[in-house]
Amino acid sequence: MEHIITPKVEYVKLLNTYPEKKSALGTLYLTATHLIYVEQTNNNARTETWVLHHHILSVEKLPLTASGCPLLIRCKTFQLLHLLFQRERDCQDVFQSLLRLSQPVKEEELYAFLYNPHQNEEDRRQGWEFISVANDFSRMGLSNEYWEISHLNKNYEICSTYPSILGLPKNASVAVVTGSAKFRSRGRLPVLSYYHKDTKAALCRCSQPLSGLTSRCVEDEQMLQAISQANSNCPFIYVVDTRPKLNAMANRAAGKGYENEDNYSNIRFQFQGIENIHIMRNSLQKLLEVCSMKSPSMSDYLTGLENSGWLRHIKSVMDAGVFLAKAVCDERVSVLVHCSDGWDRTAQVCSLACILLDPYYRTIKGLMVLIEKEWISFGHKFSHRCGHLDTDPKEVSPVFTQFLECVWQLSEQFPCVFEFNERYLIEIHNQVYACQYGNFIGKTARTHTHKHTCMLHEKTFSLCTVLRPSTLPLHFKFWCGMYNHYDRGMHPKQSVLDQLLSLTQKQVEGERTMTELQRVSGFVEVLSVWRGIRLI
């Protein structure tokens, strides 16, 4: 609270995104965790807008106008607040307070360390144990004759940014494992991401080798050989570098780079060409500039969207995920994936491939298991990429946002195979930036005979199957629900038909909720009468 200079300011205008819309007049409050704007309407109804301080991306004081002193607040959740103060002193006080509140310096200042859901210690413990990477490995069929669940990293001595349990080839010795780790950037050796029980192909991940122009490592070569030998269906493995080839070659000149096929006789190399975090950050900025255009024409909007390159980048991530899934499922080939450090592009494409391959990850819990396994436990730098703390802005990049968008694009092509919808994805996105929880900080009973089952397998298709999305440009859409989520009313870029369908769906949901409430209300009345009779 010591950073709040003025906790309450009255007669503040909230300007609408679109000029033709009427502005709101209300009171602004600053608390230890939230900015709250309370709009007072003509019928004395209260409309409240809550913004978590951690959601604020930037606060900008605009030039003084005849109407007052404007303050522009941009949020990491793509919300935009344009406030107008009567007095410049109030605007300056709020500006200074929000700058400090939205940019904590120490991890202990994050909301997660203040948030108290009134749970006891047992509830807290169960909450952290709800998602288990070990259980997910068991679900895949580990340990088996090819792969094992290893505890070599239980004290994080082999790799500090890897989980304590690892999926490793059973025929890889401790010397091979440790030797391979020393030859990989930041010790991020090749380990299992997903095992396909039917094809015996494995999806593995790591960081770039420290090969430079001429260096080699026998243990690392043996590690890749062990991964290859764990799949009897194919004599080689794909090594997929998700970076553009020029970027990888530049890293090779700096003593890192990519595998030399002359030293790894059992690999086939592929580049996927996903751009780095800086290009992705700039692309998102251009996209948001398009989103904030005042009443753009369709031509201007489409030109801006194309020039941002955002959907091209989404397509490149999707293309890589499709390649991995096709290799594992159709070609029965094991795949090893890396980028530079193996915690950005590698996390994107491995988790996307898992969703394409396994229907479990398309469930509500399965998606959280996947995020825990591929992102959190494998060291994605959420605090850096999401800008949780006041650190280097060049480290910020929408890597996880791109993954969520790829999942959304899949749900648009296959709406019936996901247990969740875009509301769940947006809520996950909001929680990543909210820092409210500790996860994203730091680091019928019918029996078939065998014959009948075989007949069904031969004549029909399974609902839970591998997804095969199209990555043609025409199948990629602008995600209005994410980037214009907080805009009120009809958006110029939305089609009238889509808006009508959305309103109809909300009306049906509202009527269903009302019917359920009436049913429950009737049940409560009956129960009250019954209890009265019992008391008599």
Image (cartoon, helix red, strand yellow):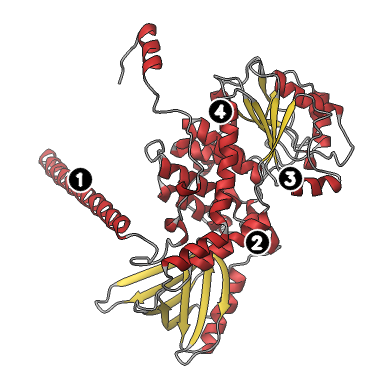
Report how far apart the C-alphas of labels 1 and 4 lie in the structure: 38 Å
Q: Which residue in the protein does label 3 denote?
A: 245
Q: Which residue in the protein does label 2 denote?
A: 389
* Of callouts 4 and 3, the N-terminal one: 4
* Of callouts 1 and 3, the N-terminal one: 3
Say if 25 sits above or below 508 in the image. below
Residue 96 is situated, as x and y percent measured from the top left of the image, at 60, 78
Per the image, label 2 sits on a secondary structure element best described as loop
Report how far apart the C-alphas of labels 3 and 2 lie in the structure: 33 Å
Q: Which mark is residue 410?
A: none
Q: Is residue 470 left or right of residue 390?
A: left
The three-letter amino acid code for the residue at tag 3 is Lys
The three-letter amino acid code for the residue at tag 1 is Val
* Of callouts 4 and 2, the N-terminal one: 4
Q: Is residue 384 visible?
A: no
Q: Which residue in the protein does label 4 denote?
A: 135
Q: Quadrant of the C terminus?
A: top left
Taking the view exactly as shown, the residue that stands out farthest to the right is 214
